[in-house]
């Protein structure tokens, strides 16, 4: 046993009298990281749910459905003159209740996402240097504290803008620890075979987090909007404790050799072998010490400049800038848009708008899995991502034009839009990042998974900050301006991958895909990408 062994795993070993198999560890890693990033996204959702409560001048009242979907009514009509629990007489909450309320809410969003983006670059470097389990735990606990403090402003009767601004900025810095860490952990435990499909399924945590965050925030909204932040904050805090207890960041941390490589390496370790660590490999031996030298806390990180030179990093990072601009605009503003839009001639309550918005993420789950599966089959990450982005354009236009015809039409078009918007976003932030982070140019002692993930997602998060900010201003001019911005963003995202798409098509035409052929955008696609340095 080493000081890097998670306490929960040590306890399991003590009770079982033997260690888990490699496959069991992989299942546990998938589950723990899934829970971790579900809680990250759940803690980001409250601000979108309470927007219509904080700035309610133009809403004219709220519905009184006591419980959110799926317990109570799903899409209740707004009852004019009603109150949304005790959120404050339907007059909003200073300083967000004035004419510039939507702009201030947009500034709150951009402050969070700007700090998240900046922190991502630092977090990626630290994630390749520090113990990932402890680093991720600290980020989750810190996020829970500051998300909760934002909600405390309701109980402390705080009406000062800078208080909410600072809480979101600090929360954004802590949230930056999440994505580079979880992708690095998954990349350490899983090779490239079917990585797109595995990570597409695993990446459902993003949409599951958005859905659970919406339901958690809406379920306690009637008791005061502050609870809509405190409950998700407690969720991610508890998730941090689970990570500390059960997450093995690297196979070497629990006594297994380096698994991130070819299928042959993985196959060399029998999945059904469950033996005592002391019996299979005495601690303190030369082999054990060698394994520990390459464990998470002993790895040498790669420089940001070196990571940027990995073929494919910059094009995918720029594509993600515009992809996340689109995705995060829906994340932060869709419930507000629904509450302001007459669907079938009737307006919805704030809770019902929040509940309805979760169906966008249901489509996103399907999109992430579908994009990963298609990219594995075609061995063409860039082509898959670009195709989805182009398909998102007509989907968003149709949703804006016909989404208000009826609730059924709104649901169908919303889920279709979520599928095409979240598909490439999920693919680039998971499989593509892991592919590039294990590129042959950084093999050996260096590890670049967290750093490359941070560069790609950090750049994407700049777009995620810009989208909601622009929406705060453009929505006052008309929602058709917002959807025009989103369509333009999707178009640019697809065009930025044009060079990689052409290269993938040319490579595919040159020789048919065979089993084990390299993936474009990863070291499996080096012949394709090295020409583009």
Image (spheres, rainbow, N blue to C red):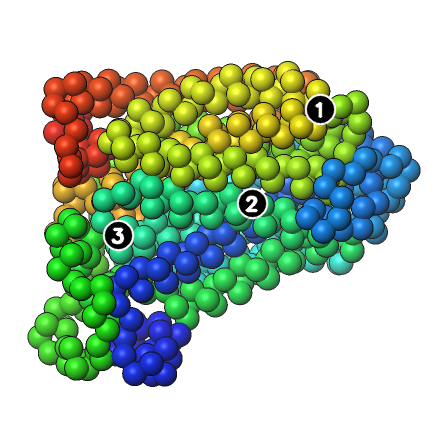
In percent of the image, x 31 and y 24: which residue is there?
A: 383
Q: Position of residue 127 (x, y in %)?
A: 32, 55
Residue 271 is situated, as x and y percent measured from the top left of the image, at 22, 63
Q: Which is more toward the observer, 319 or 94?
A: 319
Bin the neighbour count of mark 1 within 10 Å (Cα to Cα): few under 14, some 14-19, many 20 and up. some
Vertical arrangement, residue 374 with respect to residue 231, above or below: above
In the image as oriented, which residue stretches furthest toward the front? 272
Of callouts 2 and 3, the N-terminal one: 3
Q: Nearer the viewer, residue 71 or 311?
A: 71
* Label 1 to label 3: alpha-carbon separation: 44 Å
Residue farthest along the right direction in this orientation: 81
Question: In percent of the image, x 80 and y 27: which residue is there?
Answer: 346
Q: Which mark is residue 406?
A: 1
Q: Secondary structure at mark 1?
A: loop
| Picture quarter with the C terminus | top left
Residue 442: tell me if it is visible.
yes
Residues at discs 1 and 3 in contact (Cβ within 8 Å): no
Q: Is residue 24 above or below residue 74?
A: below
| Residue 337, position as x, y percentages in the image | 68, 29
| Nearest the eye: 497 or 124 | 497
What numbered label is drawn on residue 114?
none
Identify which residue, 9 or 366, lies in the foreground.
366
Identify the residue at image location x=80%, y=50%: 66
Distance from the alpha carbon under mark 2 to that under mark 3: 26 Å
Q: Which residue is mark 2?
A: 210
């Amino acid at each position: 046993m080493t000081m890097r062994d998670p306490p929960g795993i040590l306890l399991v070993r003590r009770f079982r009298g033997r260690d888990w198999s490699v496959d069991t560890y992989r299942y546990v890693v998938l589950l723990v990281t899934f829970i971790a990033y579900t809680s990250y996204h759940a803690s980001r959702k409250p601000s979108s749910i309470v927007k219509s409560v904080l700035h309610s001048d133009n809403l004219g009242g709220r519905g009184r459905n006591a419980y959110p979907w799926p317990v109570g009514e799903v899409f209740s009509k707004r009852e004019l003159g009603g109150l949304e629990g005790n959120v404050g007489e339907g007059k909003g909450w200073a300083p967000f209740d004035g004419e510039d309320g939507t702009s201030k809410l947009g500034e709150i969003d951009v402050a969070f996402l700007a700090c998240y983006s900046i922190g991502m670059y630092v977090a990626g470097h630290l994630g390749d240097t520090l113990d990932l389990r402890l680093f991720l735990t600290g980020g989750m606990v810190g996020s829970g504290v500051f998300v909760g403090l934002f909600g405390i402003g309701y109980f402390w009767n705080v009406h000062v803008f800078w208080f909410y601004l600072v809480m979101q900025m600090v929360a954004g810095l802590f949230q930056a620890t999440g994505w580079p860490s979880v992708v690095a952990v998954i990349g350490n435990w899983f090779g490239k075979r079917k990585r797109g499909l595995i990570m597409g399924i695993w990446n459902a945590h993003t949409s599951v987090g958005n859905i659970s965050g919406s339901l958690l925030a809406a379920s306690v909204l009637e008791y005061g909007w502050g609870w809509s932040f405190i409950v998700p904050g407690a969720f991610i805090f508890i998730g941090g404790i689970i990570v500390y207890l059960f997450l093995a960041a690297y196979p070497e941390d629990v006594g297994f050799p380096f698994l991130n490589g070819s299928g042959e390496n993985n196959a060399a370790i029998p999945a059904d072998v469950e033996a005592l660590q002391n019996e299979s490999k005495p601690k303190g031996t030369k082999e054990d010490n060698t394994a520990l030298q390459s464990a998470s806390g002993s790895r040498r990180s790669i420089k940001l400049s070196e990571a940027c030179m990995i073929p494919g990093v910059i094009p995918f990072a720029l594509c993600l800038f515009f992809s996340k601009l689109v995705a995060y605009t829906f994340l932060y503003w869709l419930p507000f848009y629904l509450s302001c839009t007459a669907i079938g001639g009737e307006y919805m309550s704030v809770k019902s708008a929040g509940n309805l918005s979760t169906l966008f993420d249901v489509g996103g789950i399907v999109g992430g899995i579908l994009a990963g599966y298609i990219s594995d089959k075609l061995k063409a990450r860039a082509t898959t991502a670009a195709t989805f982005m182009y398909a998102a354009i007509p989907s968003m236009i149709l949703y804006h034009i016909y989404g208000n015809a009826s609730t059924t039409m709104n649901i169908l078009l919303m889920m279709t839009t979520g599928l095409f918007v979240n598909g490439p976003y999920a693919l680039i932030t998971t499989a593509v990042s892991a592919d590039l982070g294990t590129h042959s140019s950084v093999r050996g002692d260096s590890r670049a998974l967290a750093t490359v993930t941070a560069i790609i997602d950090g750049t994407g998060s700049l777009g995620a900050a810009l989208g909601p900010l622009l929406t705060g201003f453009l929505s006052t001019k008309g929602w058709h301006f917002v959807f025009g911005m989103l369509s333009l963003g999707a178009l640019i995202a697809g065009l930025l991958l044009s060079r990689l798409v052409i290269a993938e098509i040319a490579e595919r035409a040159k020789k048919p895909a065979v089993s084990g052929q390299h993936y474009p955008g990863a070291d499996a696609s080096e012949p394709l990408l090295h020409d583009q340095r």
